[in-house]
Amino acid sequence: MSEPVAAPNPAARWAPPGSEPLLDPGLRALLRQALAIDAEPGAVPEPVPPPSALPGDAHAALEAVVGAAHLRTDDAARAAHANGMSYLDLVRRATGAPVAPDAVVLPAGHDEVAALLAACAAHDVAVVPFGGGTSVVGGVRPLAGAHSAVIALDLSRLDALLDLDEVSWTATLQAGVTGPRAEELLGARGFTLGHVPQSFERATIGGYAATRSAGQLSTGWGRFDDLVQRLRAATPAGELRLGRGPGTAAGPDLRQLLLGSEGAFGVITEVTLAVRPVPEVRRHEAWRVDDLATGLAVLRELAQAGPRPDLARLSDETETAMGVATGGAPAAGCLLLVGWEAGAEDVARRSAAAHAILERVGARPEGEEAAHAWREGRFRAPRLRDELLAAGVLAETLETATSWRALPALHAEVGAVLRDALGPEGVIVACHVSHLYATGASLYFTVLARRDPDDPVGQWERAKAAATGALARAGATITHHHAVGTDHAPWLGAEVGDLGVEVLRAVKARLDPAGILNPGKLLG
Amino acid sequence: MSEPVAAPNPAARWAPPGSEPLLDPGLRALLRQALAIDAEPGAVPEPVPPPSALPGDAHAALEAVVGAAHLRTDDAARAAHANGMSYLDLVRRATGAPVAPDAVVLPAGHDEVAALLAACAAHDVAVVPFGGGTSVVGGVRPLAGAHSAVIALDLSRLDALLDLDEVSWTATLQAGVTGPRAEELLGARGFTLGHVPQSFERATIGGYAATRSAGQLSTGWGRFDDLVQRLRAATPAGELRLGRGPGTAAGPDLRQLLLGSEGAFGVITEVTLAVRPVPEVRRHEAWRVDDLATGLAVLRELAQAGPRPDLARLSDETETAMGVATGGAPAAGCLLLVGWEAGAEDVARRSAAAHAILERVGARPEGEEAAHAWREGRFRAPRLRDELLAAGVLAETLETATSWRALPALHAEVGAVLRDALGPEGVIVACHVSHLYATGASLYFTVLARRDPDDPVGQWERAKAAATGALARAGATITHHHAVGTDHAPWLGAEVGDLGVEVLRAVKARLDPAGILNPGKLLG
């Protein structure tokens, strides 16, 4: 085996081996006080997957495409592709329910992906496209559906920058390029993609596209779907190459059918993206406002009248008190992070305008240090969760977006529903606003509670159902940037209507008549 | 008949009756010199449509929905809905090929639209949704396809502002609201949509959405598809209500399937749009640069590094020499219009930054007067074309978009192909760039030639085919904002691939199983 899959098992926890523990005394004290949990990290048991069920003829057909070195059926490789990174994924894994793909296949490029899909369709094998494995909605669960076996189609060998157009500011990247690798490839030529979701360290270009990712700079730089110029995908019915102009009126925008299709319509293999020169200055600041309403008023003014910052993030009173965002001490009011990444003159102008707005509402500057702490720690929440899970804590997030008018009531309602479902005692619901649009913004909730040792899965499933039901009733989206996967699939009809779901089924039937692509995801 | 359709026949010419002629001595001299045409306006013959073929039971079923006053089968109403506004539409009409819908039906709202679709499906009647009737690609041609009859579904009674959310800056408008009416309704509350395509005076919200319109301020304010938050549509298979957040990751964006669907998937009845407060200042300026390459460099810098203007429009040397944009005298170099519509401080800052860029490349200011002339005359090109057509001129436009890198070569290639197809003598091909993106821009070609009196339709069809073939070969879009209609349908496969077309057919089959919606459009 010439190309080892990252070891040890990356699907069991986020933190690399030997990482420093993040559960500091302040957070431990909070957990003791609010949840009555004495958070001592425990060991995570490592399940052994059941034997591979890949039939011999299917094995031979796949091996004929990628070669023996890139078809893995050993336990380590299969366990490393057994789940994504949702709370339920990790709880199920830790409690030993053994599910794993029957093989991990690593194609070298678009043509091998297309050939693998043909082989899988011929041999009745389901295909789960696998990028960074960071789905938090069950998007990479190895479900065979009605098929004889299931493989993880690992795209990590599609890791090249195929083209950089320095005149038009576009770059074509293969689907398996990770966030850091994209920045390395582009940075060497003076450009950046600037897409930084919390999953940045592991997530891939293909995954960003398939799930409509949003990053911490999406307020200024745009959501991932805004950046996509062209897409190439392999489907069981043939190849799709979409996007022929920076703007077009040539019928419906079919790129928007692949974006968010979560591997159920085809496998995205190449993406052409808008990129930018590496910014001259990156300035991030922390401010404190008296309450959520004041903070929301500031964000709305920045998003509508502008000038819009590139980063904007407002923690509610609970999240601010937890000090999670900055790792600092508990504090009153609401923490507001605001940042600019651009030329020095542009940063100076926009930050000065924002300061004027902030000072008008009585916000207090906390300097760049607290913002620096956030920036340093901004990818560490998944690592912290490893430790919380090991200590018996229910720790999960959910997110939505709605109009500015509906935002305050939705914040209150979802918090109340979650506290009611998991408490009322022993539950913490914290929230931040982190993606601004002219017409509205996102809400991102973090939930901590005592885990029910007898029914941890059911405990969260009920709370999640209650919260998602509240989103649907309020007319808010069921997910702003986490995608549908298995976990949101029951509510897709609430989002797009039953007829909308039927339209998606018609598209899937045309592109994937055998239904081998990512069974159970998106369409349930 | 209580609600007369605008008279006299609005489908025969653009100019209202009694309009002043626009064909001035300068343009006449140019036509004499370049095309050897002595442009004396002639009379346009008015064809009488053939008798309505609407079967009696279908008539009764439609009348049961809308009432007798809103179901018209008289010649005047049918002739007024007989065509769009393309050169071919008007030539066919003037040369007497009589095509007209069998009836014009005017529903009052979404529910009546839905009921009409059910009645038409039951009675095998094709439906052509009709807003302003301004399609220039055959989008409203009354084609019955394989059906027994065809109606024009006139949406002019859906003309209300249903909701204005002044906190979230969104407005919900019915599909039949025209450009001027939208501004009137929103302006009364201090808001503007700011969408100003050349068809502004007649075109409607539903048409903008169904064709992915772009307006003269789209560089700064966004294309129409960028503005759409939510859509409501009636289809033969049921209702679609799409869009539940300012951003979402809940699967593929189905709004983007309806945008650009050109009435082939459903009838858009209501659209929720991002709107803005009426800007404090509107400043438009004219500048002169030495050549197209210099102008393109300025536009690219404004679009990428910014600050981006709201209006940017660069005429090539031919268009500048014609003085068409400003109605002024012929001149050397390239005319560049640039404009800002925003708060006074913002306009001052962005215009000063643009001036610095313009002065650096040696651009000469022509003051606000020439820009004022453009602004005053910006909707008059269709009226001028009335006169050119009556005088025996072939006058048509076509448009595309591509990357900044590919733009100069594409400009040269399309010009050469058109001159070759229609000349080489007696043809003028002028062009402007008018919609900027970070990654590229649009090209808008205007073609004037001597009309072939024996085969005017074939003459243009051959030239258009040659030009569109050149676009497809170059990887540019076949249409930036004119849509597909009948005229571009043969090239849709070149744009999205044969499999992409098949996906669109699968969607249509699910939403419109009887195929009654706008036969022959989009999918051919």
Image (tube, coloured by chain):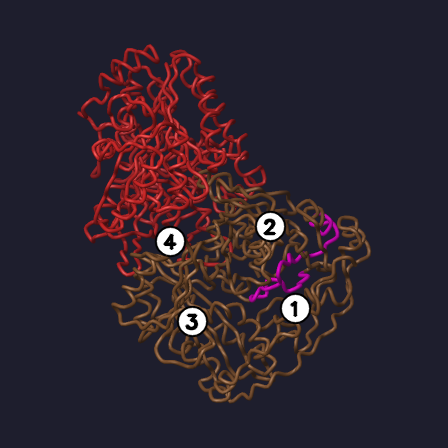
Chain colours: A brown, B red
User: How far is the residue under mark 1 from the one under mark 2?
Assistant: 22 Å
Q: What amino acid is found at the position of numbered circle 2 in the picture? A: Ile
Q: Residue at x 51, y 42 (%)?
A: A166
Chain letter of mark 1 equals: A
Precedes in sequence: disc 2 or disc 3: 2
Report whether mark 2 lies on the same chain as mark 3. yes
Dot 2: element: strand
Q: Nearer the viewer, residue A398 or B210?
A: A398
Q: Which circle, 4 or 2, is nearer the viewer?
A: 2
* Quarter of the view holding residue A95: bottom right
The residue to which callout 2 is attached is A268
The residue to which callout 1 is attached is A11
The N terminus of chain B lies in quadrant:
top left
Q: Residue A293, image x and y in percent?
A: 31, 71
Horizontal arrangement in the rendering, residue A303 relative to residue A175 (left or right) = left
Q: Is residue A169 above or below residue A364?
A: above
User: How far is the residue under mark 4 from the one under mark 3?
Assistant: 38 Å
Dot 3: element: helix
Q: Does residue B55 show up?
A: no
Q: What amino acid is found at the position of numbered circle 4 in the picture? A: Gln
The residue to which callout 4 is attached is B229
Precedes in sequence: disc 1 or disc 3: 1
Neighbour tally class for label 4: few under 14, some 14-19, many 20 plus, Cα within 10 Å: many
Range shown magenta: A117-145
Q: What amino acid is found at the position of numbered circle 1 in the picture? A: Ala
The residue to which callout 3 is attached is A369
